[in-house]
């Protein structure tokens, strides 16, 4: 039996977001190989004349964009009411129960601007237990008070 043949680079599962009833996110586990490649794509090297050495600079905006794209595959049940708990948003002309559709841009905005979502995503994506014999709804941190729909 060869280990190379058993390895899987990525696997996506649906996880319930703690404390927001009905909000589930399809997240993908990132292997070390994928994370290294992602980081490499977001890093530039520049020659520093003072130290006469190559200096690496990580483009954090590009990294967040690539990370969101690689780890958040879809979601369902994210309502405007839920969004208010994750981000500072103007909901004046919005229906609280209206769903926010998944898109790569929306995922990037959520990862970039919501510390709570970003923290949860990092905990979930890098915890291998979440991707073994998948049990839907498991969450790495305790849920806060749920918002009723």
Image: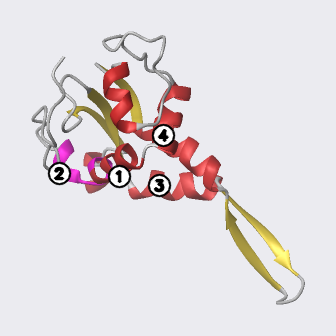
Q: Give yes or no for contact between labels 4 and 2 (Cβ–Cβ under 8 Å).
A: no
Residue reaching furthest bottom? 51
Mark 4 and mark 2: Cα distance apart in space: 20 Å
Q: Nearer the viewer, residue 112 or 148?
A: 148
Compared with residue 62, is residue 86 higher up or lower down, i.e. above or below? above
Q: Give yes or no for contact between labels 3 and 2 (Cβ–Cβ under 8 Å).
A: no
Q: Give yes or no for contact between labels 1 and 4 (Cβ–Cβ under 8 Å).
A: no
Lateral position of residue 106 relative to residue 43, left or right:
left
Provide the secondary structure element on which disc 2 rests.
loop
Residue 18 percent coordinates (x, y): 19, 39
Indicate how the structure is coloured in the image.
secondary structure
Residue 147 percent coordinates (x, y): 19, 28
Specify few, some or many for label 2: CA neighbours under 10 Å numbering under 14, 14-19, or 20 or more. Answer: few
Residues drawn in magenta: 124-131
Closest to the camera, between mark 4 and mark 3, is: 4
Provide the secondary structure element on which disc 4 rests.
helix
Residue 76 percent coordinates (x, y): 30, 19
Residue at image location 36% in from the left, 43% down from the top: 117
Instruction: Label the magenta part by its dominant secondary structure.
Output: helix
Closest to the camera, between mark 4 and mark 2, is: 2
Residue for badge 1: 119
Residue for badge 3: 35
Closest to the camera, between mark 1 and mark 3, is: 1
């Amino acid at each position: 039996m060869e280990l190379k043949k058993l390895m899987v680079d990525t696997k996506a599962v649906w996880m319930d977001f703690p404390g927001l009833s009905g909000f589930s996110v399809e997240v993908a586990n990132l292997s070390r190989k994928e994370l290294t490649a992602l980081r490499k794509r977001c890093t530039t090297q520049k020659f520093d004349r003072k130290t006469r050495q190559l200096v690496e600079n990580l483009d954090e905006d590009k990294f967040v964009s690539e990370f969101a794209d690689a780890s958040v595959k879809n979601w369902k049940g994210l309502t405007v009411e839920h969004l208010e708990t994750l981000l500072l948003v103007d909901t004046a002309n919005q229906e609280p129960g209206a769903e926010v559709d998944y898109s790569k841009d929306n995922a990037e905005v959520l990862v970039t601007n919501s510390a709570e979502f970003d923290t949860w995503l990092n905990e979930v994506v890098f915890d291998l237990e979440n991707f073994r014999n998948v049990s839907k709804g498991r969450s790495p941190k305790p849920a806060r008070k749920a918002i009723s729909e």
